[in-house]
Every structure is written in C-alpha cells, then in structure tokens.
Amino acid sequence: MSPSARVLGIAGGIGAVLTGAAAAAITTGRWRRSGPDPLLDEPLGRLAPDRTSTVAADDGTPLAVDEIDPADGGRPALTVVGVHGFALSQQSWHFQRRDLASLRLPRVRQVYYDQRGHGRSGAAATDTSTIEQLALDLDAVLRAVAADEPIVLMGHSMGAMVIMELAQKNPERFAEQVCGVALIATAAGEVGARGLPRSLLSKYNPVTRGVGELAGWQPGLVEFVRASGGQLTRQAVRRLAFGSRDVSPRLVDFTQEMLAITPVRQLVNFVDTLGSHNRYAALAGLKHAHVLVVGGDADRFTPYSHAERMAAELPDAELVRVRGAGHMVQLEQPELVNSHLIDLLQMCSGVNGGRSPRRTWWWRR
C-alpha cells in the first residue's frame, strides 16, 4: 500500500481516527529519497477522469473541464475545484486528483479545468489575458458544473490570484457557497517586489519574453530548446520550480511537459496582469470561508513572506510552511499538502466540528 493509501485509509477511512495533518506526521519520513525514484511507476498526467466537458466562458472561449467522482461510488459531500497556475495546466493537480478520489470522510467530487490560453482550453486574446477575465471564467465553470453544492476552491500561483479576484467580484458566492479556500504558492500583490525582480515581469524586456518572464529565457530560444530536447530548459525548470536537490527527475520532466503544451507567445499576454496584481483588499471577500495558506520556503517565484503577509490579513487562516519546497509544492511534497487539504475538507464538511484556531505548521522532508 502506498503512503497516500495509508494516509487516506486513516484520515478518510476507519472512523477518521486521525486528521490529515496527524496522518501525514506518520508518513512524512517515507518520502525521503533513499534508493530508486519512488515515482518511477507513477502515471503522471495519465489519470482518466470520470467525465470531460467543455464549458463556454461568457465570451464563448471553450474551457476544458474534467470531473472525478469518489472512488467508492459514494455520494460526495463537497465539490473541490482546482485552479492551476501560470504556464501550467490542470495536470499540475495530479497528486491531489489521485489521492482525494480515495477520501471517504468526506467524500468529494473533483473538478479541474484548463484556464484560457493554457492546456486544452481555447486561446486567450491580448485583451482577455487578465486575472479579471480568468475570474469570470472560473465563475462560468462553477455555474456550469457546481451550481448548487458546497465548494472548496484550491488555487496554485496565478490560480489562487484568480480566486482572490472572484472573491472581490462576488463575495456573496463565498458567503453562501464556497466554504473553504486553499491558496498555494501565491501572493496577494507585490509579485515583482519580492522574489522575481520586476524587470522579469515586463513583456518589453527583449531578453525575458514569454515563459522567459518567469525564467529568463528568450521565446525563440525556448522554442528551439524545447524542440531539440536540450538540457538548458530542463535544468532551469528544476532550479526554478522545485526547492529540493533530490526532487524526482520524473517530476521535472512532467513539469517541463506541461510548460511545453502552451505556446510561449500565448503566455506573453499574461505578463502584465501578473506584474500589476494587487488584491490584498480582495482577501476580505474570503472572511466567510475556512482558508488554508501554503507556501514553500524555497519558492523562488513567490517567497514564503507572501504567505505570511496573506495570513496576517486573514487572522483565522491556517498557515503552512513547507520547508525546502519550491513553487511546485503540491507536486514536490504532495503528502504534506494533501494532509492539510484533508483537514480543510473535513473542517468544511463538519467532520472536525467547528473552525479551528489559527495554526502554523512546519514540515521538513
């Protein structure tokens, strides 16, 4: 039985004896690299959904949506919706998708979609490549596939910024339907002030366009290196996306594959909206929801100080510091992230009773 099966068998199975965080404490040591790559046989990006559909955004842009039902066929108590980050796709939620399907207390239905301009969804025009538009797209997805049930939103990086914008635009939805929010490896503002220098967030910088806004590459070089399978791109992905030196090579390859799906010039259009992102005021729209803030303290894109600032603005939020993890923390340390997601889901469904006091957790692999 895999570590995930043990965690979920305890946390979601026999009477929910332990919460997700407590169960993770038992299995943390099992993720230390000792010997063969533990992900050698992991079907990264190849999990089949129960249903696929296309949701039309308000302007008609097609959004690719996958749905996953509880593995045991039971009735879900909640719907979890994952909103991925910049230059990625819904596949970036691989381990959450895999493990939450086995959860029994509570059972959850999962919804993942590709944001416009990413993955299998339609292209984004220059004037629609904004966090504001992406929030309208999220709202369209919620109306189409999760109109009536309680919702927990998970956002990674830019995806969490989209959730903040939706909370600002539609606080009523959060007061009435969204019972929990997970903000993972993200920032509420000042993206260029801490972490990446603001010069890397300018589409007018000729050396750092496209994916280069976040990695220092020129678009023509990126396309060439991707096409040739050179090592420059792979090394840069490993250094910029992950914190651990012993990260599985398969995770690096998987992340590189996601980055390769979306054309570089399509991503250029989103640079301005990332550079101007400032939604600290929007956090007030989350006051009715249970909030989980997760940050890796080796994140080069959105340093852990951003997580601390958001948690300070949300005094009832749970703040989780994942030591040694980089920007792709949900891939790099999935057992730990999932354990806290399970706690959030249990809290929202009433398994753990009422709201717990704010806690800060430190985990080291």
Image: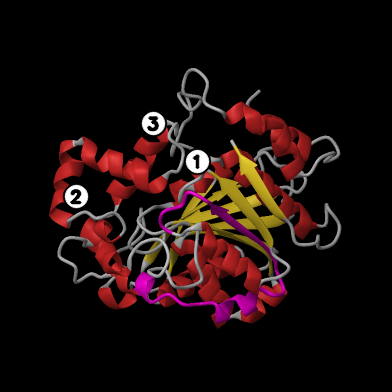
Question: CB under 8 Å between callouts 2 and 3?
Answer: no
Secondary structure at numbered mark 2: helix
**Mark 1 nearby-residue class (10 Å; few <14, some 14–19, many ≥20):** many
Measure the alpha-carbon separation of dots 2 and 3.
20 Å
What range of the chain is rendered magenta? 273-301
Is any atom of residue 266 visible in this view?
yes
Asked which quadrant contains residue 231, the reply is top left
Q: Is residue 100 above or below residue 262?
A: above
Decide if residue 237 is on the left or right side of residue 221.
Answer: right
Secondary structure at numbered mark 3: helix
Residue under label 1: 332
Asked which quadrant contains residue 17, the reply is top right
Is any atom of residue 60 visible in this view?
no
- Position of residue 138 measured from the top left corner of the image (x, y, whole percent): 50, 68
Decide if residue 4 is on the left or right side of residue 37.
Answer: right
Question: CB under 8 Å between callouts 3 and 1?
Answer: no
Please check the rendered image and state whether residue 310 is part of the magenta-colored stretch, yes or no.
no
Secondary structure at numbered mark 1: helix
Please check the rendered image and state whether residue 295 is part of the magenta-colored stretch, yes or no.
yes
Circle number at residue 222: 2
Residue under label 3: 249
Q: Which residue type carries mark 3?
A: Pro
